Amino acid sequence: MVCIAYAFKTLCLCLFFIVVASRPTVKTKVFNVQRHGSKPDGKTDNANAFTSVWSRACARRSGRSKIYVPKGTFYLGGVEFVGPCKNPIEFVIDGTLLASANPSDIKQDTWINFRYINDLSISGFGTLDGQGKKSWPLNDCNKNSNCPKLAMTMGFAFVNNSNIKDITSLNSKMGHFNFFSVHHFNITGVTITAPGDSPNTDGIKMGSCSNIRISNTNIGTGDDCIAILSGTTNLDISNVKCGPGHGISVGSLGKNKDEKDVKDLTVRDIVFNGTSDGIRIKTWESSASKILVSNFVYENIQMIDVEKPINIDQKYCPHPPCEHAQKGESHVQIQDLKLKNIYGTSKNKVAVNLQCSKSFPCKNVKLIDINLKHNGLKGGPSIAMCENVDGSASGKMVPKHCLN
Ligand SMILES: *[C@@H]1O[C@H](CO)[C@@H](O)[C@H](O)[C@H]1NC(C)=O
Ligand SMILES: *[C@@H]1O[C@H](CO)[C@@H](O)[C@H](O)[C@H]1NC(C)=O
Ligand SMILES: *[C@@H]1O[C@H](CO)[C@@H](O)[C@H](O)[C@H]1NC(C)=O
């Protein structure tokens, strides 16, 4: 009797799973790119094959679509994956996507671009190889107004409720990942790598975004590990390793008209190793827009041989002389910053630099438990420098703070 009851229960359970699993709404259709005309020979341009797979996956009316890139090297020209799609799309990359080494072969500003999509998920243990090496020496736009336009590796614009997991981005020509007007997006387990001397190879760059989470990610590049630009709010960054690179950087801000506030940033459990900067906020002098930078928390951050561990620079001018150098102070108001448990070593004597605007002094800057030692051979212990800052300090304080 017990046995029959048990068999019956098992049968019911099995039927239940069969019914659940075969409901049309959860059915996934797999598009293996190799079975749809793509060739992993590292030479054939698979751009058309990929975009036609995308169109089919995107147009399905029910279920989920999964685009699968198996192991192998798929050479890919510039591609745009455009929605809106009728169903969620999973893009699983286990192979290598290879860009052209010749920058003029990519005739758009982003090599692989996603636009107007909800519910996109990109994952896999594959690599986006931007082959930037030939492009880096051409990146001389500071000096040469005819400099060639170089493509970023992967871009997202007007994308919501989506995520990237696990993939690697290698040697972008310009930035690796670019986000514009993206909301509710998670980035986790991603690896981003380019040499420390490769110009403008930002790791993750975003503007006009909200509710982005970046976690468990390893970034080493020749520019900002993460760059946070105008209009970004509710950004959460945790468990990130950054180095080489220029740190986690807010800005530059204030240069252009119509910029928007940057608010609600949390940065915690970070290691900066051998970077030029760590915690950085940069705004131009004499800004065209008057905006607010507020409610930032930086917590549990280790600095290893960082040139400028904490650096607020409201006189940003990377290539002097700057045309607005004479026009006065930054109009970007920085306020409500908390920096807690920031420790390690500073390559420069000035470990803490809080250089704020005379017209809009920084307000409510809280320093709690700072321990940043100067590791240089000469010059003595680390110091802090303040200009136009109002705030408070508590707990361990190395260097001695300079707040009013
Ligand atoms: C994406 O989210 C933003 C902000 O929540 C919203 O304004 C926009 O309409 C959304 N886009 C789509 C396509 O759902
Ligand atoms: C992002 O991660 C959070 C926390 O793990 C989760 O609640 C949320 O649903 C995720 N969102 C997306 C779009 O993957
Ligand atoms: C920091 O970087 C150096 C040089 O690349 C490396 O040898 C060291 O292991 C790194 N330290 C940590 C804690 O990651």
Image (cartoon, rainbow, N blue to C red):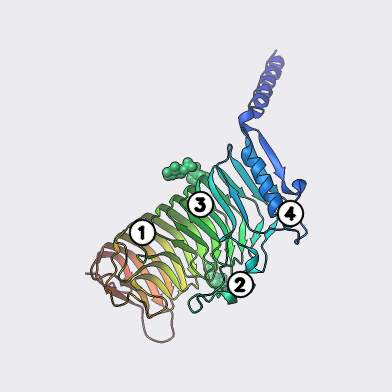
Q: Mark 2 sits on what residue? A: 135
Task: Where is residue 64? Give x, y as percent.
Answer: 62, 37
Q: Mark 4 sits on what residue? A: 71
- Name the side, left or right, on which 122 lies relative to 319: right
Q: Distance between the residues labelled 4 and 3?
A: 28 Å
Q: How far apart are marks 1 and 3 (CA)?
A: 17 Å
Q: Which amino acid does label 2 sit on?
A: Ser
Residue 308 sits in which quadrant? bottom left
Q: Mark 3 sits on what residue? A: 157
- Name the side, left or right, on which 253 lies relative to 161: left
Determine whether the beta carbon of the residue marked 2 sits less than 8 angstroms from the nearest atom of ligand 3. no
Q: Of marks 2 and 1, which one's residue comes earlier in the chain?
A: 2
Q: Of marks 1 and 4, which one's residue comes earlier in the chain?
A: 4
Disc 3 is placed on an element classified as: strand
Q: Residues within 10 Å of mark 2 (few under 14, many from 20)?
A: many
Q: Is 353 above or below relative to 337?
A: below
